[in-house]
Amino acid sequence: MRLTCMFSFILLFGAAGLVVFIHLQDPEEIVHQQTPGIKYNMGFQQPKKDCVSSNNQDRRLRKNTADGVAAVKQSYSLHLSENVPTKLQSTDRRQSSIMFAMKDQQKGEEINSIRLHKRRRRFIIKKSPILISINSSILNLPTLKSEDRNNNKWKSLYQIQRERKQIMRETCSKYKSNNRRIITPYHVSRIFVEDKYRVLYCEVPKAGCSNWKRVLMVLNGLASSTKDIQHNTVHYGNYLKRLDGFDHKGIYHRLNTYTKMLFIREPFEKLVSAFRDKFEHPNNYYHPVFGKAIISRYRVNATKEALRTGSGVKFKEFIQYLLDVHRPVGMDIHWDHVNRLCSPCLIDYDFVGKFESMEEDANFFLHLIGAPQNLTFPKFKDRHSNEERTTTKITQQYFAQLSPSQRQRSYDFYYMDYLMFNYSKPFEDLY
């Protein structure tokens, strides 16, 4: 009987002790006993605001937060060191711990929010759409100055621009649905910005883009002459800003108020020019990346040397790659459609120049924007200067290597560019 009573007393005493222990337990210590991987701080679940904080603001906030935490800790330790009854000390300890956890949670939320927005800024810029109404360009084609209106040359070039824009718009209206135009930064990723003269230039490779970048650099005051700028400086110097590098407000403002222009080239001629440049000369990128894949897929009994280096791609093999819906390697800007590079059905370009009339069109554009009179479009060939430019005659020689079916499919591939920019069929047997 005595043993039974003693055993019952021990059980009751143990249960009472457990209750007291749980009651006095620090809430902060309870938090750390949660399931691993689940954090008490729920800052990541807070709604994210579309805002951007600078590095200095971020550092100041972190410093203020650290100072606040240090102050709370110091106050907490001084409070515990006071000579007070145990029960009150325990109660104050729990309250102070809860206050600390709440303050730490709030400040943690602010830091997490800033960190998230800082990381998400680039994501937001790259992914979020910009809604722009049809034909929203405020500027449109710059008007001729009063003294130029009696100049037959300027009047003729001005009328040509109006006709080109009209054809482009009619083609877009017929083949594209643009009731609501959604422009993302991807659509403006090929557009370069010149803020001084308020120019937006969409880069089309093999259509005078290197020399146009030189002109933009001179307009921006980065060089005194286009002749002083080397090829690598133009393409790898990162001196020119791209439109997708701005926030939504900056993109929208420039699209609606700057003069937007692009220069295009006869599609087959542009394609042959790109092939000659990238595959008929040494190239440490296009040969191993594109050449090896093309030779491996389309050349029968390819030599080990060709498979190893990717050099010596033939034009017919290149066309096979271009027309293959299951390409062994992706598309490249040098032979992509202008329709995809510059999105002319989404963006109202104010000026459409052609490579075939480059000097006349380019200098007319410079005249319209009020560029310095001593600045003219450079005539020199940027690369392989000793080699003849790709002409209509050279283009026909390359396409003569193809079958009629391959020529037709190539024309179909660039059909929208031919239609939108009013180029005639390059071969009579095309339909």
Image: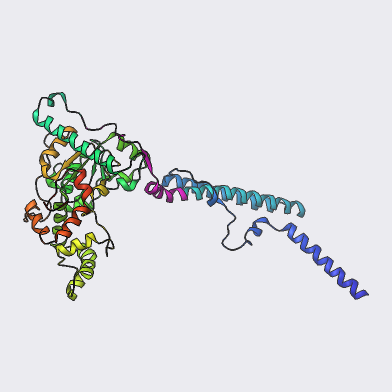
Where, quadrant-wise, is the N terminus in this rendering?
A: bottom right
Q: Give the color scheme: rainbow, by chain, secondary structure or one colour.
A: rainbow
Expressed as whole percent of the image width and height from the top left, the position of residue 385 reads 8, 54
Which residues make up the magenta segment?
A: 116-142
Res. 331 image quadrant = bottom left
Asked whether residue 76 appears in the rendered view, the answer is yes
In the foreground, 3 or 301: 301
- Whether 124 is among the magenta residues is yes
Question: Does residue 27 appear left or right of residue 108 in this picture?
Answer: right
Q: Residue at x 35, y 36 (%)?
A: 133
- Whether 126 is among the magenta residues is yes
Numbered label tally: 0
Expressed as whole percent of the image width and height from the top left, the position of residue 362 reads 14, 39
Asked whether residue 83 appears in the rendered view, the answer is no
Vertical relation: 143 (above or below) 206? above
Question: Does residue 197 appear left or right of residue 357 in this picture?
Answer: right
Expressed as whole percent of the image width and height from the top left, the position of residue 105 reads 58, 50
